[in-house]
Amino acid sequence: MQLAFGGIDFGTSNSTVGVIRNGKARLVALEGEQPTLPSAVFFNFEDGHTYFGRRAIGDYTDSVEGRLMRSLKSVLGSSLANEKTRIKARLIGFTDIIGLFIGHLKARLEEDAGGPVENVVLGRPVQFVDDDAEADAKAQGELEKAAQAQGFKQIDFQFEPIAAALDYEQNVTREELALIVDMGGGTSDFSVVRVSPERAGASDRKGDILANRGIHIGGTDFDRLLSIAHVMPELGYLTPTKDHKRNLPAGYFIDLATWQRINLVYTAKAMTDLRQIRYEAERADLVSRFIHVVEHRYGHALAGLVEKAKIALTDQPSTEVRVSLPGAHFSAGITRAGLEETIAADIERVTETVKQTIADAGVDASAITAVFLTGGSTAVPLARRRILSLVPQATVIEGDMFGSVGLGLALDARRKFA
Ligand SMILES: Nc1ncnc2c1ncn2[C@@H]1O[C@H](COP(=O)(O)OP(=O)(O)OP(=O)(O)O)[C@@H](O)[C@H]1O
Ligand SMILES: [Mg+2]
């Protein structure tokens, strides 16, 4: 009997599941007809159920009482991975929450397959953690354990940019030396690969993968930086204490601006600290806004507004983040230039990584004939501009922004399990 298999792209922001049906890779419908599922989990305290994806985010924004978790992938390999978080009376580990999410994807996969699926290729960024092989191995181990706990028996990993290359290769008509660019929510990954219609069927492709590099910078970092630079000052960040001896401590502002740390400000200790900070602040009025944001559990909604503003600035020169909560009315204008200044250092590190990937490949940049773009953050104009400037002669191919990796993982799973 043929083994049932699938590919899972567990993304920082969005996840997909790829399968082979009638000889072709396709994505499984994960939420209604949608092939993507936002990587979000909501523990609903009112009905005691756990929800995933758009439904999770929807419940949270309808202010149902509960706890929302996002950007869970960023926790892998970090100190948070070993921590537990309080979900009402229960303490539950972050990796167990990742397990619940993977289990949900597995259920969709099995529904699509019409039976159990125990074999899977999981995508992984080239580096979960930058320049720390031990933490990186730990991250992959945590993801593997989470998948095992959900009943997967054979678990293999593939680099996300290689999966994207496999998807791209299905449509090439001649040999290309391609730069694959996958910039997502948490990481940016690059490979230089030789692709061609003839090579696509070969079982061992090691010789065609000339280089592979990644960096732990992605769209959620841009959200964080944008929030810190343009929104947190409206909540008191970088304002002085009454005695003008120092600025207010930065920690809670950074937590509130960082997707996977938002829940850390929803503790009794944080509230006590924040009241003390407000007492000492020259601009107590601004810190009051922060306290109202926390009291209304508005942190993820605020981060969502910042992300929306970032996305709006892909197409327009300016926008604003407007908050109208009881006790916290304000708006922060942001321009495209402001965004670009805020993320410039990160984009330079990304660009440097692309340069190094091409150097690793041992080819001249001018030899690259095609650039394949996938991942939501390749839409960011500055990122695109800087990366494409390195290979001006190459043909730019727009991949499926959110689906390429999942499709490629299915192709890889076929190679490994069929
Ligand atoms: N039009 C746009 N302009 C700018 N950024 C965008 C746009 N559309 C999506 N994004 C960003 O793309 C990111 C999500 O991309 P994607 O779904 O490819 O990531 P992911 O696969 O979940 O993450 P990763 O691969 O890093 O684990 C988010 O940060 C989102 O804000
Ligand atoms: Mg991705």
Image (cartoon, rainbow, N blue to C red):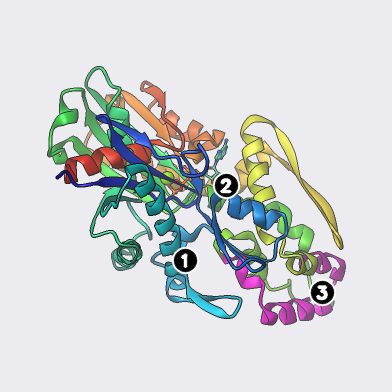
Instruction: Using a 10 Å C-alpha cutoff, classify the residue at mark 1 as few (fewer than 14 neighbours), some (14 to 19) or many (20 or more).
Output: some
Q: Is the N terminus in the top left, top right, bottom left or bottom right quadrant?
A: top left
Question: Quick one: label 3 or label 1, which is nearer the N terminus?
Answer: 1
From the viewer's perspective, tell me whether residue 198 is left or right of residue 257. left
Figure quadrant, ligand 2:
top left
Residue at the spot 73% in from the left edge and 72% down from the top edge:
248
What SS does tag 2 mark?
Answer: helix
Tag on residue 414? Answer: none
Per the rendered image, the range of residues in magenta is 261-290
Q: Amino acid at mark 1?
A: Ile
Q: Is residue 218 magenta?
A: no
Front position in the image: 80 or 52: 52
Task: Find residue 30 and report its horizontal and vertical position in percent.
Answer: 46, 44
Cα distance between the residues tagged 2 and 3: 29 Å
Tag on residue 97? Answer: 1
Question: Quick one: label 2 or label 3, which is nearer the N terminus?
Answer: 3
Disc 3 to disc 1: CB gap under 8 Å: no
Residue 47 sits above or below residue 209 on the image: below
Q: Amino acid at mark 3?
A: Ala
Residue 251 sits above or below residue 321 on the image: below
Beta carbon at label 1 within 8 Å of ligand 1: no
From the viewer's perspective, tell me whether residue 219 is left or right of residue 28. right
Task: Find residue 102 and report its horizontal and vertical position in percent.
Answer: 40, 57
Q: Is the C terminus in the top left, top right, bottom left or bottom right quadrant?
A: top left
From the viewer's perspective, tell me whether residue 319 is left or right of residue 213. right
What SS does tag 1 mark?
Answer: helix
Q: Which residue in the protein does label 3 denote?
A: 281
Q: Amino acid at mark 2?
A: Ile
Q: Which residue in the protein does label 2 denote?
A: 343
Task: Find residue 233 and report its horizontal and vertical position in percent.
Answer: 75, 59
Q: Main secondary structure of the magenta part?
A: helix
